[in-house]
Image (spheres, rainbow, N blue to C red):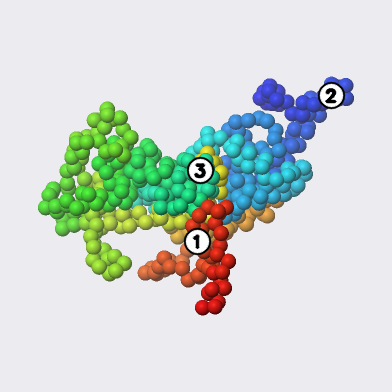
Amino acid sequence: MAASDVTQKEPFLTGFSKHLCGSAKRSKQRSIQIFRKKALRDSTSSFARLFENVLPAAWLAGIDPTRRIRDFPLILVFWAWFAQIIEGNASCSKALSMIQAWSVAAGLVGPKGGTSGYCQARIRLSDDFLDQIGTRIIGSLQGATRPDDLWHGLVVKAFDGTSVQLDDTAANQQVYPQPSGQKPGCGFPVMDVVALINLSNGGWEGHATGSNLHDVRGAQGLIGLIGEGDITLGDRAFCSYECIARIRANGGHSAMRLHQARHAKLDWRRGRRLGALERLVEWEKPSVQPKTSDLSEEQWAALPDTMTVRYVKIGYEDRAGEKRMIVVVTTLLDPVAYPAEDILTLYVKRWDIELRFRDVKTTMGMEIFHVKSPEMAHKTLRMMAIAYNLMRIMMQKGAAAAGKPLVEMSFKGCLDTVASSQVMFAGPWWHVTKYGRMAEEVVLVCAGKLIDIRPCRQEPRALKRRPKPFPLLTSPRHVFRENPHKGAKRRVA
């Protein structure tokens, strides 16, 4: 028996009477405790077994901040929340039904009542607990990144911003108010998110949240995740002297579109000519520290006074067919090691971050967080990143098994495969070898989930199906009254 089991502060089933149990009290408690642990381990069978090599049960138990035996143990709640997310952001009622079904399969009495207990258990999942899980998953993703998924030996990462709607509650409105153009009671709170995505393995490595959060301000807290051997892509909103200098100070590189303010004053004759489409230009540090900067005066003064960057010009046609030009700024100065054509191809990969956001928001159904408080919005965002990264691990394994590039794997196909794999892992907890083979079978199924490469395919952002002809909500719902004669007047006309 482990020392921690003997010295635990809150013994299991403390209500045993010495008069009834005598000297055998300890052994009876111990036998019931062992059975319950085995049953709980069996109740998390479906996904805990599938990802056992990434998140071992023993490791999860080691970071569990509480030793109390609850109706909703934290590890069980974690996997139930994971199942809730990959089921298309399903309701808490469905997650509770999963826990009840797992409990019955394990020979336990499932929790009764409504979803209140499960929702309170989700709140008890600490940020530190989720952060440790997220860090371990990201480490697994990075360790399995293949050389073929790199660009010139560099790990490609990208910044971008997006937003998520929250439930219309007073707490959410206070921290993340709805857009100013919407009437009170007719809109939803909006949480802005700036994320750093690893495009070499698709992993969600970090994020910052805020209200009306400027992209540069959000990215400043994520620069610490960029280091030696990384190159970061970003649109022109991120192309600031401070951002590029801080990335370079960490040992990383960047390739970003020239900011519109600098593009308006662009003089292609300045700097040293490297070719018809590229030049070396020296930037000077702004005389005044920008308002979006989060550096102290000493840190701002420590930035270099000048910085040499490379301009690469790109010609393209817009949606109207008109010829236009953009300029990419990069700290990769060697035109031989990094030709201009390769830089242009690299910058095109920046669009991949939009596809990753689509995987999360559209495919996983995370465009709206049905939460009542900002604290739960932050936890949901962490859990969403964990679930998404676990899917990327399955895609990595599937790509390796199929011998295909990671970009050809279907996120939706792997998501459906994992969500449907629960029935494969039902059974006694001691069939370790059997479940190992089943996990390999799931990977082989994911290996067959490839996307169809259709070059030059156009997908305009237009809806074919018409929405239902309901009127728009122009006042709070408890005040709004529909015109009862609207339909009659339309029929008469």
Q: Position of residue 220 (x, y in %)?
A: 35, 39
Look at 27% across and 44% down and name the residue there. Answer: 240
State the residue in front, 229 or 205.
205
Marks 1 and 3 close (CB-CB < 8 Å): no
Look at 38% across and 44% down and name the residue there. Answer: 213
Residue 276 tag number = none
Mark-to-mark CA distance, 2 and 3: 49 Å
Mark-to-mark CA distance, 2 and 1: 65 Å
**Most distant residue in the left direction:** 269
Whether 98 is drawn above or below 472: the answer is above
Look at 63% across and 48% down and name the residue there. Answer: 92
Q: Quadrant of the N terminus?
A: top right
Marks 2 and 1 close (CB-CB < 8 Å): no
Q: Is residue 32 left or right of residue 161?
A: right
Question: Nearer the observer, disc 2 or disc 3?
Answer: 3
Look at 23% across and 66% down and name the residue there. Answer: 323
Mark 1 element type? loop
Task: Name the residue carrying label 3.
Answer: 172
Residue count near mark 1 (Cα–Cα under 10 Å), binned few <14, some 14–19, many ≥20? few
Question: Nearer the observer, disc 1 or disc 3?
Answer: 1
Task: Name the residue carrying label 2.
Answer: 17
Q: Amino acid at mark 2?
A: Ser
Task: Name the residue carrying label 1.
Answer: 472
Q: Position of residue 319 (x, y in %)?
A: 31, 67
> Which comes sooner in the sequence, label 2 or label 3?
2
Q: Amino acid at mark 1?
A: Leu
Question: Nearer the observer, disc 2 or disc 1?
Answer: 1
